[in-house]
Structures are given as structure tokens and as C-alpha cells.
Image (tube, rainbow, N blue to C red):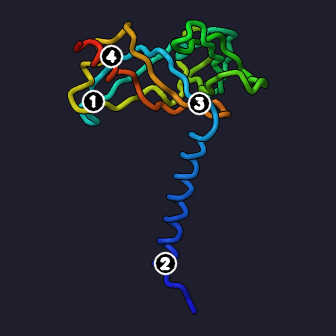
């Protein structure tokens, strides 16, 4: 019995979708959930709606210069103030200690002091009309919760914006 072409097409698409879902679930399995302090900027995009672009203390490189754009960089984080994690130092090598909290980033340009590093946790979409409200919390207690898998890949989970808003309304 010959299987129709349409069945093969559906099967291939189901495998692609299943692979994508498996990859996303793998990123969220294992690892750590931590809070980091962002520095929000640019709250509105006419085509995509309200969103916030975050930068972090580990978004700008400082360390040993390297002339390879696109190089992986590891931001080693520590919890010095017990409320959120901050950058301790940058490394070109993945930490060997499994208890080390680190993010794997990519240099967008030549690695010199001040070079931008991306971790794919820089954009956060917010409900319509709330983008400007985030600006009120710049430099205050706004925190971002991220999940870091064992490979150092991060996923932005949520912010504490709602709690801050409730606290301010009281």
C-alpha cells in the first residue's frame, strides 16, 4: 500500500514541530532560575507593540581583548546582595564547576572594552500600554527572572513589575 504524499507532508511538519517543542522544553529543563537587575530602554515599536529592551551589567564586555566577532563569551554571575545576581567576571572558557552560575553570550563585534554581548534575554513583550510604565521603574527595584540551563543558555521568564506596581498603589 502506497502512503499518500499529503500524509508524508503532515508527518514531516509534525516532526519539525515536535523537534522545536523538544528543543524549547530542553532549554527549560535543569539549570537555575535567578533574578537579575535590568536597565530598560526603548519601550515602543510601532510594528510589534509594547515591549521593553533590557540591558544588564553583563551586556557590555570588559576584559581581555579578542579580535573575533561572534565569539562565545561566558558571564560568570554571583549573588553578592542576596536579592539578584550580578556579573563577577567574563571568561572565554565555559566554567568547569557545575555549581557556577553563568550565561553564554555572543559578542556582536570585536571583543574590546564596551563591546555589546547578547544573551537572547534582551527583549520582553508587555501588554498594550504598559511599555511606558516600565520607564517609571528604571533604576529602581525592577528585576527580571531568567532561567539558565546547564549550557548557560538563558530564557527570560518574567519581571517583578506587577509586584512593584501593587506596592506603589498602596
Return the disc, 1 or 3, that comes first in the chain's sequence: 1
Residue placed at 63% from the left, 13% from the top? Answer: 78
The percent position of residue 7, horizontal first and vertical second, equals 49, 78
Residue placed most toward the observer, 24 or 34: 34
Label 4's element? helix
Badge 4 vs badge 3, beta-carbon distance below 8 Å: no
- Residue 24, image x and y in percent? 54, 45
Q: Residues within 10 Å of mark 3 (few under 14, many from 20)?
A: many
Read off the residue under disc 1: 50
Discs 2, 3 touching: Cβ within 8 Å:
no
Q: Residue at x 51, y 33 (%)?
A: 155
Spot the residue most to the right.
96
In the rendered image, the residue lying farthest to the front is: 170
Sequence order check: which comes first, mark 1 or mark 4?
1
Mark 4 or 3: the one toward you = 4
- Label 2 belongs to which residue? 7
For marks 1 and 3, give the CA distance: 25 Å
Assess whether mark 4 and mark 1 are in contact (beta carbons under 8 angstroms): no
The residue to which callout 4 is attached is 164
Amino acid at each position: 500500500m502506497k502512503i499518500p504524499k499529503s500524509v508524508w507532508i503532515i508527518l514531516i511538519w509534525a516532526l519539525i514541530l515536535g523537534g522545536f517543542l523538544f528543543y524549547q522544553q530542553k532549554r527549560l529543563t535543569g539549570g537555575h532560575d535567578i533574578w537579575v537587575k535590568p536597565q530598560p530602554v526603548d519601550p515602543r515599536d510601532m510594528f510589534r507593540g509594547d515591549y521593553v529592551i533590557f540591558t544588564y551589567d553583563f551586556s557590555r564586555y570588559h576584559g581581555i581583548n579578542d579580535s573575533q566577532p561572534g565569539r562565545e563569551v561566558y558571564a560568570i554571575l554571583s549573588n553578592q546582595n542576596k536579592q539578584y545576581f550580578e556579573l563577577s567576571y567574563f571568561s572565554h572558557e565555559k566554567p568547569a564547576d557545575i555549581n557556577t552560575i553563568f550565561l553564554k553570550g555572543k559578542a556582536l563585534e570585536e571583543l574590546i572594552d564596551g563591546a555589546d554581548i547578547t544573551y537572547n534575554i534582551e527583549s520582553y513583550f508587555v501588554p498594550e500600554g504598559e511599555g511606558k510604565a516600565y520607564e517609571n521603574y528604571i533604576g529602581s527595584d525592577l528585576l527580571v527572572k531568567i532561567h539558565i540551563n546547564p549550557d548557560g543558555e538563558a530564557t527570560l521568564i518574567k519581571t517583578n513589575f506587577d509586584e512593584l506596581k501593587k506596592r506603589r498603589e498602596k
